[in-house]
Structures are given as C-alpha cells and as structure tokens.
C-alpha cells in the first residue's frame, strides 16, 4: 500500500477526529452489606481493565499487529490488519461465545485484511476466531485445522491459521460491546487522572526531590508506601527525558498498586511522543500491579520502550504506535493499537522507503545527522506477554452507593473470576509452539448480547496513514528525542 506522509504541525501529524463513542458509562458497585441498614458511601475501587472478558489486548477501533506475538487473546473493535503475527501463544483466554465450547482467542468487530494484511496470523492453543465482517473471507476446513483466507490487497495474500477446527458458520459475528466497554474505560481513566499524587521522584545523584529541576538525563527513584495506592503524576516530556527509573525497596503488589498518570501535551489532532527509559525494580512479579494511565492522550501516541514495558497501557482515547525493545508485560487498552518492527538488516530503511533525511528535517525540523543516527536503532521485540493487571484501584472523586445485599456482590465477584480464566490445561495436539492455556469457561455471555451490527462503524480510515508511515514516524520521533537530549546536555 502506498501513501505519502501527510504534512502536519511541528512535532506531530494531523489527525482526523476519532470515532465517537455513544452510550452512558456505569460505575462498578463494590460496596458490601447484608442488611438494609444505611451504610455510608465508599470510594469506588475496581480493576480498571475489568470488562475486557479476559482479553490481553482490547481496542475500541482498528489495530495493526506486525512482526511479533501476543501471548494472550486479542479483541479488536473494528478492522484488523496484520503482518506475520501470532495470537494466544500462552493462553486462548476464557471468553466463550454463545454456542461455542472453546474460547475465542481472536475477536474482530469489523473486517480482517481490508487495508492489506501480509502473511499469516496464527491462533494458538485451540482458540477460535470471531469476525464481524466476513465479506472478504473464505473459510477452509479441508485440512486438519481451519484456515481463513482473505481477498488479496495489492497482490499480497494473507490468512488466519487456527490450531483447531471451527465450523464455518460460527466464524461470523462479534459478540462484544466495545462501545460500552470503552465508555466505562474513559470514565475510569479520567477518575484515575484526578488522583492526588503521593509519589515524589528523587534524583539519585543528589538524593533530593526534583521539584522544578529538569529531569533530563537523570535517574528518578520512586519510593512507594506499602498498603496504599501509590500515584505518580508525570508529563510525557519529563518521562521521556529521564535516563532511567529505579523503584525502591517497597514494590508494587495487590495492596500496593502503582498508578503512573502520564500527562500528554498534544491535542487530538497532534501526535504525542513518549519514550519509557529502562526501569529497574519492576519485573514480571510487579508488572501486574503497575498501570500507565494516559487519560489526556486523545490523538496519536508514539510509544518507544527502551526496555521491557513493565505494566498495563491504559489509554482508551489514544491511537498508539508501539515499538517495544523487550516487549510489554501488561494489558493493552487503547482506542487503536499498532505494533511494528523496524527493518532488519538488509531490508529497506525508513529513509529509503519514505524519503531522504532532508525530508525528515523538514517534517520535524531536526538535524540530518540525528536522523541518520536513528537508523542504527536495534531491532525491537514487540512481544506482548500475558501479564494481566491484577489489582483493584480507587477511582478518585467517585463514590459507590451501598449495596442492597451481599448476594449481588457475590455474583459480581464470580463473574469477574470467570473472566480471568482460573485453572489450566495442556496445549492441544499439533501446536508445538504454544504453552499451557487457562481452562475455558463453560458458559458464555448472556443471550441476546451485542452483535456486530451494534458495533462501531468499520471504515478502516484510522489506519490508512498509519500503516505506510509507521516505521518513519517511530524513527523520526526517536530522532527528535535524541536531539532534545543532546541540546539539553550542551
């Protein structure tokens, strides 16, 4: 597919307004009580990603998954395109659509491959596929496992290969109400953004709080308090300028979650650029309790992680283009999401595909040699590790009315447990690359739930410019960061 980079404002691309989401949001009711006696209202506490039906990645609109894998299941609200990708390599999840006996590891609200997918998307662990618009799809059950092929775009063939057999008539349909889920996610994200910060970053060189001092090329140490919700509010510019982050002796846990509110400066028509520096002290054990909340990101967000992204990305209004050096441990909740690898050695570079360095200089007003330096960035590993967010956090500024009785709360808790997929099974035969998968639920969503006809409009417009510009944008954005750091150090 070919298209040129649109001329944008300094530091970002012009964007058309995103898909509007209709419907009122509802707060989670978590108060407890066994009698009808009056009970004082309590703050709302909730797992912010609940309602995702156990999917590791959930987008409201389009997604492009390129050159990597997701260990968990994926749900895309509109169009999905891919470039040689694998889904559910560790678990097919727990979401069982009505009438099915196996979990759906890939749910797409719109069409697949409409913009020009390339290669194969492989669904592991016996997971099934649900696609809202199958007009360009052909289901083939002539072999051992089901293969879904898509009409070629630009003469590039593409297909989804399952590791099980799925009846053709069950492929069509999108049984998730993405609009309702994201209306609630926006409410939760805004509430978390309103929380008062209680984590003060300290400069490891001076052992003093940063205060108004610049953070560029410094290492910030975060000291958490046990048994409470820890909140760090930081701008995208300050976070991107840091040389590193260290977390002290107290680590995030179920009763000590860490919420990092990243405040972006760009509006919905511009592009934000965020670089997460290497983080020391947040490993696989702590990642389920770390949430990066980007409530103010309403346009394109170019995300580069220089190490492992150690937590959940919660940006329900953002179109995220991610280049992850060592993958991500956490959920992805975004309006749109794209992973992309920089070209490998011997393949065309960003400038060969999208123009000479002088054109990047005009685009972002940066120096030619800085752009050239970015071409030496090593290959990124965009693996999305199956590490779901596992803590309840307080939604600041909200209150939950007291419940009528304890029975309703017990039912709510049971439903949430079903979504997380407790238990485990061994991988199905014929899938040597997969690892163990949680046991699927025996019951699916309520009958009469939302269908594809009630989902978001499927236009594919959100990714038309993103697909062809992805590599160039990441490279140019990284160059801008390097230039900023160099100028601050001189």
Image (cartoon, rainbow, N blue to C red):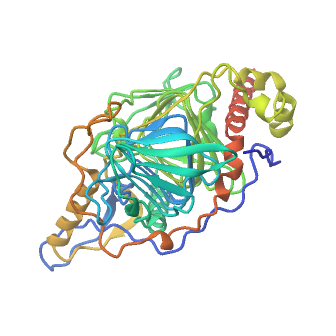
Task: Pick the residue in front: 340 or 38.
Answer: 340
Front residue (pair 245, 411): 411
Q: Quadrant of the N terminus?
A: top right
Question: Which residue lies most toward the left here?
Answer: 35
Q: Residue drawn 50% across and 55% down? A: 138
Residue 172 vs residue 345: left or right?
Answer: left
Question: Which of the 4 quarters of the picture holds residue 485?
Answer: top right
Please tell me which residue is depicted at 50% across the width and 73% down the height of the picture: 453
**In the shown orientation, is residue 167 left or right of residue 276?**
left
Against 373, is 350 above or below? Answer: below
Residue 250, position as x, y percentages in the image: 32, 32
Quadrant containing the C terminus is top right
Q: Nearer the viewer, residue 304 or 444?
A: 444
Say left or right for 227 vs 364: left
Q: Position of residue 319 (x, y in %)?
A: 60, 51
The answer to which quarter of the image holds residue 86 is top left
Q: Position of residue 153 (x, y in %)?
A: 66, 49
Task: Point out the residue furthest to the front here.
Answer: 142
Q: Is residue 260 visible?
A: no
- Which residue is farthest bottom? 36
Asked if residue 351 can be seen in this view, the reply is: yes
The number of numbered discs placed on residues in the rendered structure image is: 0
Residue 313 location (% of width, % of height): 48, 45
Splitting the image into 4 quarters, where does residue 427 fall? top left
Rendered view: 272 above or below 211? below
């Amino acid at each position: 597919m070919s298209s040129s980079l649109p001329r944008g404002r300094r530091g970002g691309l012009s964007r058309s307004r995103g898909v509007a989401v209709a419907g009122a949001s509802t707060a989670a009711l978590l108060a407890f009580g066994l009698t009808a006696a009056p009970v004082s209202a309590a703050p709302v506490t909730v797992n912010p990603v609940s309602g995702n039906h156990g999917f590791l990645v959930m987008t409201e609109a389009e997604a492009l998954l390129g050159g990597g894998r997701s260990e968990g299941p994926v749900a895309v609200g509109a169009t999905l395109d891919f470039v040689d990708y694998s889904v559910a390599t560790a678990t097919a999840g727990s979401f069982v659509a009505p009438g099915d006996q196996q979990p759906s590891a890939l749910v797409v609200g719109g069409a697949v491959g409409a913009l020009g997918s390339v290669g194969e998307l492989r669904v592991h662990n016996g997971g099934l596929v649900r696609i809202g618009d199958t007009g360009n799809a052909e289901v083939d059950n002539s072999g051992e496992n089901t293969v879904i092929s898509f009409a070629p775009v630009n003469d590039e063939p593409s297909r989804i290969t399952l590791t099980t057999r799925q009846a053709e008539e069950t492929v069509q349909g999108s049984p998730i109400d993405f609009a309702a889920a994201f209306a609630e996610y926006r409410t939760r994200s805004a509430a978390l953004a309103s929380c008062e910060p209680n984590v003060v970053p300290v400069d490891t060189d001076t052992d003093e709080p940063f205060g108004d001092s610049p953070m560029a090329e410094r290492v910030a140490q975060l000291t958490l308090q046990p048994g409470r919700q820890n909140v760090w509010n930081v701008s995208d510019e300050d976070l991107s300028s840091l040389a590193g982050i260290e977390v002290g002796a107290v680590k995030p846990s179920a009763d000590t979650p860490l919420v990092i509110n990243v405040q972006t400066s760009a509006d919905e028509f511009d592009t934000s650029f965020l670089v997460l520096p290497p983080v020391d002290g947040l490993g696989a054990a702590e990642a389920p309790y770390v949430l990066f909340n980007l409530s103010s990101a309403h346009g394109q967000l170019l995300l580069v992680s220089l190490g492992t992204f150690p937590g959940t990305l919660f940006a329900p209004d953002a179109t995220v283009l991610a280049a992850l050096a060592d993958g991500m441990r956490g959920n992805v909740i975004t309006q749109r999401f794209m992973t992309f690898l920089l070209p490998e050695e011997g393949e065309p570079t960003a400038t060969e595909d999208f123009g000479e360095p002088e054109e990047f200089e005009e685009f972002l007003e940066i120096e030619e040699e800085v752009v050239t330096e970015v071409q030496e960035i090593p290959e990124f590993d965009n693996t999305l590790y199956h590490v779901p967010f596992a803590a309840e956090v307080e939604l600041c500024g909200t209150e939950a009315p007291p419940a009528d009785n304890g029975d309703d709360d017990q039912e709510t808790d049971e439903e949430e447990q079903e979504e997380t997929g407790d238990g485990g099974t061994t991988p199905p035969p014929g899938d040597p690359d997969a690892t163990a998968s949680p046991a699927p639920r025996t019951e699916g969503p309520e009958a009469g739930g939302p269908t594809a006809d009630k989902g978001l409009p499927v236009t594919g417009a959100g990714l038309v410019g993103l697909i062809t510009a992805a590599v160039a944008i990441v490279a140019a954005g990284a160059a801008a960061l390097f230039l900023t750091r160099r100028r601050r150090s001189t």
